[in-house]
Image (spheres, coloured by chain):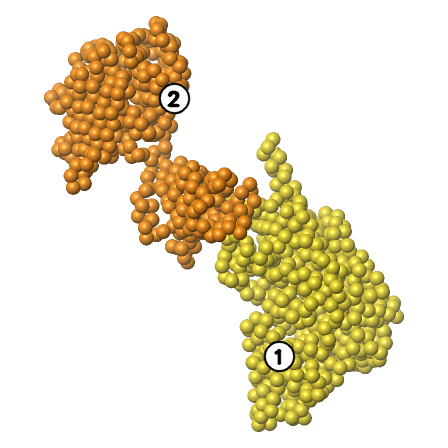
Amino acid sequence: MSAHGLVAALLADTDDEEWAARVPARLDTFLSALPAPVRAGVRTAAAAVDAYALLHSGRRLAGLTPDERERVLGSLAARPGLVPALDLLKVPVLLAAATERTPLPRAEVAPEDPPLDCTPAEEWPDRATADAVVVGSGAGGAMAARTLARAGLSVVVLEEGEHHTTASFGRRPPLDRFTDLYRDGGATAALGNPPLLLPVGRAVGGTTVVNSGTCYRTPDHVLDRWSRCHGFHLADGLPAHLDEVERTLRVATQPLGVLGANGLLALAGAERLGWRAGPLRRNAPGCKGSCQCVVGCPTGAKQSVQLSVLPEACAAGARIVTGARVLRILLDHDRPGLPRASGVLVRRADGSELEILSPLVVTAAGALQTPQLLRRSGLGGHPRLGRNLSVHPATSVAGRFPEPVTSWKGVLQSAGIEELHERGILIEATASPPGMSSFVLPGVGRSLRRELEGADRLAVLGAMIADRPSGRVLGRDRTLVRYSLDPRDGERLMTAVQAMGRVLFAAGAKEVLTGIPRAPRARTLGELDALLAGITARDLHLSAFHPTGTVAAGGDPHRAPADAEGRLRGVDGVLVADASVLPGCPEVNPQLSIMAAALAVTESYAERSSSSRSSTAA
Amino acid sequence: MRGTTFTETMLGTVRLDTGDPVRRIRLDLRAECEEILRPHRTTSAQVHGRLRIAGLADDPNATGELEISPLARRRIRYRLTFTADGRDFTLDGWKSVSPRHPVRSMTVLPFTLYEDGARAGQGTLRFPVTTGLAPFLLSFRFPRREDAAQYAVPRWDGSPGRTEVWYTTLTDPATGTGIWLHHELVAPADGSAPIAHGWAAAFPPEGKVRHVRFGPAPWHSPTHGFTAEGVDAGPGRLTGSAGDFHWNLTEQPLGEPLFTFPRWSWRRPLLPATHMLPAARATYDGTFGDGENTLTLRAAPGASARINGRGNARRWAWLHADLGGSDVLEVVAAVSTRPVLRRLPPLVFLRLHRNGRTWPRRPERSAVGLLGAGRFRARIGLPTWTVTGRTLLRRIRVEVTQPEERTLALDYRDPDGAAAVCRNSESADATVLLERWWGRWRSEASWTLRATAHAEVGDR
């Protein structure tokens, strides 16, 4: 499908700009990378708009003049019920438009990545053995692999995605990288009211390749809750592990020099309000402010695990197999007591299969994939497996400033405002490459075009809230997530929107864009409060980036599918070492928490097995 | 307890990692499990066989192990070590059984080659169903796995009128001397105290046969075997001295127990007597001195046997012939002392253990035939006696010659006091001809033993 008419209508294309003509082709390329249901949904919506145009004007959108297209879209946008659907249709079009409109930044000479022992699955033998298999190479998997390899085990890390080098990031436009680096082309969503966009990474390095690099330590009160209420006693030793992870990732406060106007405005607004705020601690020493964290850092400054932890794991003997999707964990049932993991069955991209036998399987496929893997393996019997999903629902607000902000120059996630953190709200100045923000510009047609052309004057803030575990991962194969926003969390989100508006106005914004179709803009704080009075969290565009807790560890066998040391209950030889093992919402960006938990779980295993070996020898 | 043995042949291709071309590979395996192969359980097996890689390897001594678990673990794993081109390789692979593709998954064996623990190549072996299935299925055997030591334990339960024998015959391969060690327990029929006695004899190729008796001595009911008057015959060890004879031998059993009479007759002593070998073959190491010569034995072939019954037969003949390799022929032909039975011709119990199988399959076949028809026949005499017999497609002729100068005559005494004379030679001659019917009788195998057969003829 080529949606020439729809693109021309949404962007008010008058054939006077060369970039606009390339947008339909770019859109087609992007859509082809999305899962079939999403692709079908977008195409059906585009066809519906075309059909409306046919009924309205007797011709399809492509055959209409610019004025006629404007009238058709105006007619559609006048119906409040259709505006959210039009917003959904705008997202891929704006992505394609921003990609074509923004010239590809000049590729800098990328530093050479530290060496990794990566083997494509096609070159890996059909039969192999290892002491430990780690499923997933993200934050948890990398840490687990390094710990086990350093303990002297032969470790194989299986990664469904591919290995992307820093140099390859510099050579390709952001949108192309986006579709390669994210599962389902970034279109993973949680069903519910409201629905949530829930993008997760899929590459060597996992989501750490595409996260913002923000590194918060797990707050003490969260550790205390995990240990005291959930019986996750490893949390008591997590501060020391967090120190180790911070050392590994070279975490430091982001210097102000490359922060960018977006972050500086946020800090200025918070200062005028007297709120606690500051540049974020990040794992990006020498960050050059490329603002491309979410599509892979092109300068190699961000210490994603494929640049920091995995090279150390490989130096200790670990091997990484790429393009390898683990179909199931193999089990030996014919033994006294519990069944025992004996390896994994893996499918290559070409459909062929390979097996690796190993007495230890570490699941680190992420909070959305680990429960599905366990179900496929016949290990999904625990009633709480897949439940207890927290996601940190997030929304964003933009402020229009009189002077250019050019938010996409500088650090992507630069400053944090922690004034409301005790109330579960964390505000972070979060810009993004053009078109990739979860913030959707208001309007259609000419008004949208004006917003697009004035986007350089927008500063964007995002807020995420500490949510109740209201979600659930379903299914065995395709990612299927349900999430019902808790009423308390809805209120927190509305408070967060209002707070972000206050910061932006305090920083000097002339106008605040809420991203809410029914109440798109406010010019004063009072106007914003009035706007938000009739709005609920269900009207917001929500996204989430931190799924956790679906195979929670804890002391209560009825509530926690994994025991207090991260071993999956009901089977021997399966460790859970990713975001799913966290007992509850970490309330901050979770990379450090996940890595520290994975370190604790695997270190505990290594100590246990070495002590049992020595007692056997004695 | 029974074990399982089977053979399997697989063909396929392999490629070494060092840019080697794809080569054909063939694996011929013989697997031996210590237990019955149960498909729903996991069974381990030792494998040995021949592995051939075109242009690279032909190792007839590949060894390794097999993990057979088609249902429980859905895996049949092969681990073999072999030598190719002077390099030691390990083949590690497994069939991954899937109910969706039962045939393909049970016949395709992807594997990886390792050299010094590092990956050195990979390939795939396939079981050829059309040509390989029938031989594979027909190769399955479930041999008993028994400990020879359990058969050395005395059987006597205190009842009068019983006799029990532990005897060993062997041939020194260096000098050709035959050796006979006989240990006997007799519980007299009159209820008096049991006595232990026996003798040792040497049959040198040149010179006179020498022997010495020991006992009678009181019986102290040992638990492991025979012990009396400084003579001991237990599992794995034979020691003693009598007169100027002395011996100290260790026994290494080779092969499974061989029941000359039906197995049930050993378990339940319903026949007048029964005879069996705890191990069909054995080798002996140690020293044996007969006063004139002291022999140092190294891997001397022979066998130990056990007799349990009420006494000696009216007439009998016995042969133990080590046919080389793992083949053994054991023959007992006997006429009972019982009324009525004593009028019957000799009952022949013939057991030919060859290529891992024993023929005839049941001992009763040679003794009583099929309802009396087709029984094996013995013509007992001296110096030559013969046994002939046939089954449906196979027949055998055994001719034993015991030259007088190499034969020792000894007096026997039954529990009831009756006397018998035994003429024994541990350096007898024997010829064995085995034929198979294939349009006509064709020779299948023949053996000629010169002074290495162990034989005996007894009468009253």
Task: Please give the chain letter of the residue carrying mark 2.
Answer: B
Indicate whether A287 appears above or below A515: above
Q: Secondary structure at mark 1?
A: helix
Q: Quadrant of residue B408?
A: top left
Residue reaching furthest to the front: B55
In the image, residue B379 lies at what x, y percent?
A: 15, 22
The span from disc 1 to disc 2 (Cα, nearest Å) is 86 Å
Chain A colour as displayed = yellow
Q: Quadrant of residue B326?
A: top left
Indicate whether A31 appears above or below A279: below
In the picture, which chain is orange? B
Q: Circle 2 is placed at which residue position?
A: B299
In the image, residue B382 lies at what x, y percent?
A: 17, 16
Q: Which mark is residue A25?
A: 1
Which residue does the image show at 15% across and 35% down from the upper left?
A: B370
Q: Which mark is residue A360?
A: none
